[in-house]
Amino acid sequence: MKLSDSTVQVLKNFSGINQSLQFKEGNTLKTISPLKTIFVEATVGESFPKEFALYDLNKLLAKVSLYKDAELSFDDDKINISTDNKKKSDYIKYCSPKVIVTPPEKSITFGTPDCSFSLSQEDLDWMRKSAGISGSPNFVFESDGSVIHFIATDVKDDSADQSKIEIGTVSDGKKFRVVMKVENFKLLDGSYDVSIAKKGLAQFKHKNVPITYYIAIEAANSTFGEE
């Protein structure tokens, strides 16, 4: 098996959420952050032939990067990495799934959202940079009943910096203020369809890549209502 560039990018993204990963047989990859505030599910082009777990996903990615065209094969206890002519080779031992944080077997059932909107890559990139400059710990999605704003600030500090950008409009008059942690925005680059449920979860579905993120919202600081 050879890993496509798109799958490598997904695995790099996963490694920033959880350094360990349990691979399941097939072409679906899932991961969850150690604090269980981020859950991600992706479909990739390759089909993995068996279930196994790696303690350090970055080690696999680093090893694969040493090869111009790495070939992967899977034994009972290890993953083999080699060139087509077998002149170079590595192997990495599997770990027990019991020693890592693994996602639930079932996919998340999101249900009917309490609010939804689109988020462009341009707006997301701008806000990430602005939040980084100010050291803002919170992202806020806020609707006044007609316009939706994306905000970076510290909701617990009235004297904190604030960055704000208009990202859309609402037609149903719904008002909401959804607070999230910047540290949980470990999204693959791109534009997203966003749905939020007041029970405490936000869904970010990539518009071009088959990957979906479920991120916890700060429910105690978030409000939902309509006029």
Image (cartoon, helix red, strand yellow):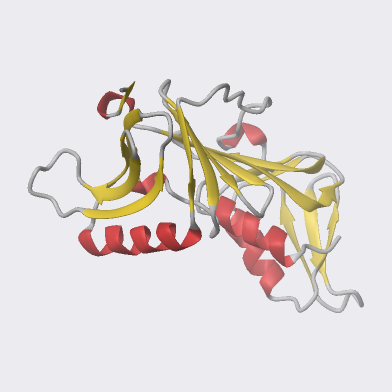
Residue 224, image quadrant: top left
17 and 149: which is toward the camera: 149
Q: Is residue 151 above or below residue 36?
A: below
Q: Quadrant of residue 66?
A: bottom right
Residue under the image location 90 percent in, 74 percent down? 84
The vertical placement of 60 against 14, above or below, is below
Q: Residue 29's spot in the image, x, y percent?
A: 70, 43
Instruction: Report the front residue among 184 and 163.
Output: 163
Relative to the observer, which residue lies in front, 23 or 43? 43
Residue found 55% across the figure and 22% down from its top: 112
Query: Is residue 197 depicted above or below 144 in this figure?
Result: above
Q: In front here: 210 or 184?
A: 210
In what quadrant of the picture does the C terminus appear? top left
Q: Position of residue 93 (x, y in %)?
A: 72, 51
As displayed, is residue 156 above or below residue 74? above
Say which residue appears at 42% left-offset and 29% top-offset: 172
